[in-house]
Amino acid sequence: MSALWPGFALSFSLILAIGAQNAFVLRQGLRRAHVFAVCLTCAVSDALLIALGVSSFAVIAEALPWITPVFRYGGAAFLIVYGAKAFWAAWTGGEALAAGGAGVGSLKATILTVLALTWLNPHVYLDTVVLLGSVSTQYGEAALWFGVGAVAASFVFFFSLGYGAQLLAPFFARPRAWQILDVVVGLVMWAIAAKLIFLL
């Protein structure tokens, strides 16, 4: 649990950021169109990228011991900036997750769209492969459980968003809800950055 929970918390916090992928999942959920396929595609894509990050960084860290502190402090710096951006977004407000858009479309078109939103987004690689992969190295043999927690967070988030869209959409359409969420995300990011820096 000491590795699984941090993996879950960090992954969940990263996914919470407002973006085209989340808006698309929410829209499909609102329309009850291909919800399972969309959620599964997003979650499995994340799982593959997280597995790549965790396994790759474990091998690289063993071959090049100096790279772990580089990514450790680099990851901490990224989290500090990411957290600051979340706090700034909470301070300025005015953001909301728009669920509107084009029609439902076929299953094939829907899957191709969600794959493009996932695999063509450079931030996805930074979050999953680089950031989660580098943080996982501090857990040593328990890195696998860190990855399991990160993957679990992805499945929980996407299926909750897709199937809970009817309940979540009115709430997250309000800027105030995102301000509260941004504060929580910022706190989680800074807490994990502190752990990386001071090896708590």
Image (spheres, helix red, strand yellow):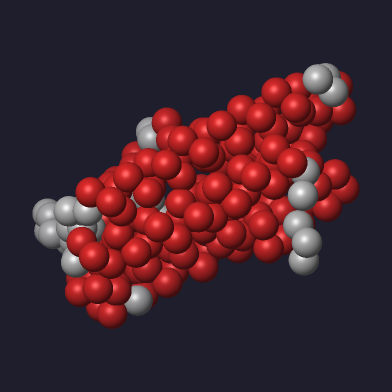
Q: Position of residue 195 (x, y in %)?
A: 69, 47
Q: Nearer the viewer, residue 169 or 121?
A: 169
Q: Position of residue 152 (x, y in %)?
A: 60, 63
The quadrant holding residue 62 is: top right
Q: Position of residue 36 (x, y in %)?
A: 40, 68
One can see residue 22 in this view: yes
Query: Does residue 140 appear to the left or right of 190 in the view shown?
Result: right
Q: Position of residue 11 (x, y in %)?
A: 55, 53
The quadrant holding residue 153 is: bottom right
In the rendered view, would you say 64 is above or below 2?
A: above
Residue at 81% of width from left, 28% of height from top?
61
In the rendered view, would you say 11 is above or below 26?
A: above
In the rendered view, would you say 70 is above or below 55?
A: above
Residue at 12% of width from left, 54% of height from top?
102
The quadrant holding residue 145 is: bottom right
In the rendered view, would you say 111 is above or below 65?
A: below
Residue at 20% of width from left, 74% of height from top?
170
